[in-house]
Image: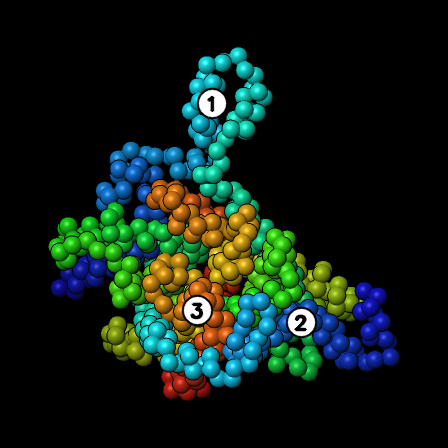
Amino acid sequence: METVRRLYPASLDRKAREEIFGWILILPALLIILSLILYPIFYNIYLSFFNVNLDGGNTYIGLDNYKDVVLDPFFWNSVITTILYVIFTTIGTTFMGLIVAMAMNKTFPLRWLVRSLILLPYVAPVISVVFAWQFIFDPVNGIFMDVTVNKLHLFADRFNLIGSPKAAVWVAILFSIWKNFPFSYLMILSRLQAIDKNLFEAAEIDGADSWQKFKAITFPEIYFVMGAIVLLRIIWNFNKFEEVFLLTRNVKVLSIYTYFKAFTGTMEMGQGAAIAVIQFSLLISFIFIYVKKVLKW
Amino acid sequence: MVKKKSLLRSTGFVLFILFIVFFVLFPFIQMLSTSLKYQWDWGNPSLIPRKINLEAYKELLNIGQAEKSLPDSIKNLLKNTPNLTKTQKNRIIARYKDTGNVFPFFEYFKNSLILAFTAAALSGIIAIFGAYSFSRIQYRGRSTIQRSVLFVYMFGGIVLLIPLYRIFVKLGFLSTPTGTFLTLIVIYMVQTLPVSLYMLGNYFRTIPYSIEEAAMIEGLGRFNIILKIIIPLSLSAIITVFIYSFMIAWNEYLFASIFLKGFKNLYTLPMGLTALFTSKNAIWDRIMAASMLTAIPVIALFMVVQKNLAGGLSEGGVKE
């Protein structure tokens, strides 16, 4: 307290004292964010121009890391996987969130229970649910193979769905939709609950059907919240690591590709840093287009 | 005609709700079911175990495991000499126990708990003051600070992983267990700080300013206003933010997997579970039981604060 008092003597007017006090309060948070988020980001950009040696020394190699990355077909593969993953999970979570929110906005018995059960996938730790998903798709014991092969005869033989990169990406997408749609649902539901009920009554008197009511009343009201959750989902899933990595290491989205590049084998940290920079630039341009074209801000 | 249509519609609605509940709960039911099944029952698609198997839970919770892991000769010795006292018996068990195969669930649980609790508490405390500052006090640069807090959302963990790893290796923190553990606490705190700042800032703005003005007229300084008025009034929001940060740290795997690689006894639950899954002990019932035990504390916490948490989430203060 003594230092605080000394920093703003009585001679300062109230406004200046407030200003100093405001800065003192934010300072710890600011220092932490500056030193452990912003500084590392710039350090990452710096590292991307170096050959990072594990014993400590770095050698400047200019754009070589970027060249190596861009010429690597596996990199482009993971760019495509990431875009596929982001597009389908975003559409899936938003669409499912919307339908479920509309259903939960109606009254029915036990609604309170269903509403809280729906949130379970979102709050359960990733690590505790991935194994259940792996078991469901397990070639020997899993129920998915039992139903599709033995009951419905869709496939001739049991196979390891999570084991093949081509198929596993769809399992990862389905898993992400299951895990994250409750968030979209929650955001949309709270917006739906705020819509004036009189609007619907007026529309009914005018003879509007459900679709017309949705188009004329509900959709304009939730347009912005939908825009915001799509934006958040794109940002989050573009950087997603845990949800994919723990479920299957075969789906090499950019974060996982970087992780393997920088921390396994020859540990190419410089190249890893370069991929992270590219990844971030891709995300920024993606967002820029989205904000300009879709949200029209 | 109208009645028939509405009956069809309400049946469809009920079926849809049931489908949603099934979709949401199925993996959890599968988890519970497999954790209670014997190995010969795994391939059976029915979710109800033919015979309940509690071994996996007993093993993880260390119930009745002391004698099971003993070599046979010692077991026989214990059986054939019934006049041993309890302390003698325990001493023999402790000496010959084979701990190599036991999954140290409690230790991982404890590590996760300490890490998540400390990180969430620290970030909560720093965020209370920071959020009060930019939501209540007027000063130059305030909106820049607010905006940059939001900007931090865009950076995934992977962008920070390489530079932070290099920085802490250079500082020499990662060569000792204590240093590594502290580093992880700091990193988890940093990861949850922006969320906490944002959520608390949103909440503080809903507290009527007149309450503070009244207190100022009474002669209370800003600092005391935070301690005596703002904190008690926003206790539910603070707890919500704490639990939210706790869950982020409890779930974290990316940083733990790199930083804790060399320190097996510092493993967090996500680390331990992945290690268990890829080890020779990888048995579905144990994996599922461990998954259940990892999920239960978080789900229980969630149930306690559900209403607040749901509110906090929909106010937009979230990070994944």
Q: Residues within 10 Å of mark 2 (few under 14, many from 20)?
A: few
Q: Is residue A194 visible?
A: no
Q: Which quarter of the figure has residue B171? A: bottom right
* A2 displayed left or right of B235: right
Q: Specify the subunit that label 3 lies on.
A: A
Both marks 2 and 3 on one chain: yes
Amino acid type at image mark 3: Lys
Q: Quadrant of the N terminus of chain B?
A: bottom left
Q: Specify the subunit that label 2 lies on.
A: A
Measured in 3D between alpha carbons, the distance from the residue under mark 1 to the one under mark 3, in whole angstroms, is 49 Å
Tell me the residue that label 2 is attached to.
A31
Q: Secondary structure at mark 2?
A: helix
Residue B128, percent from left and from top: 65, 64
Residue in front for this viewpoint, A91 or A17? A91
Tell me the residue that label 1 is attached to.
B74
Q: Secondary structure at mark 1?
A: helix
Q: Secondary structure at mark 3?
A: helix
Amino acid type at image mark 1: Ile
Amino acid type at image mark 2: Leu
Q: Residue at x 20, y 50 (%)?
A: A146
Measured in 3D between alpha carbons, the distance from the residue under mark 1 to the one under mark 2, in whole angstroms, is 59 Å
Q: Which quarter of the figure has residue A126? A: bottom left
Residue in front for this viewpoint, A91 or B42? B42
Residue, far top: B83
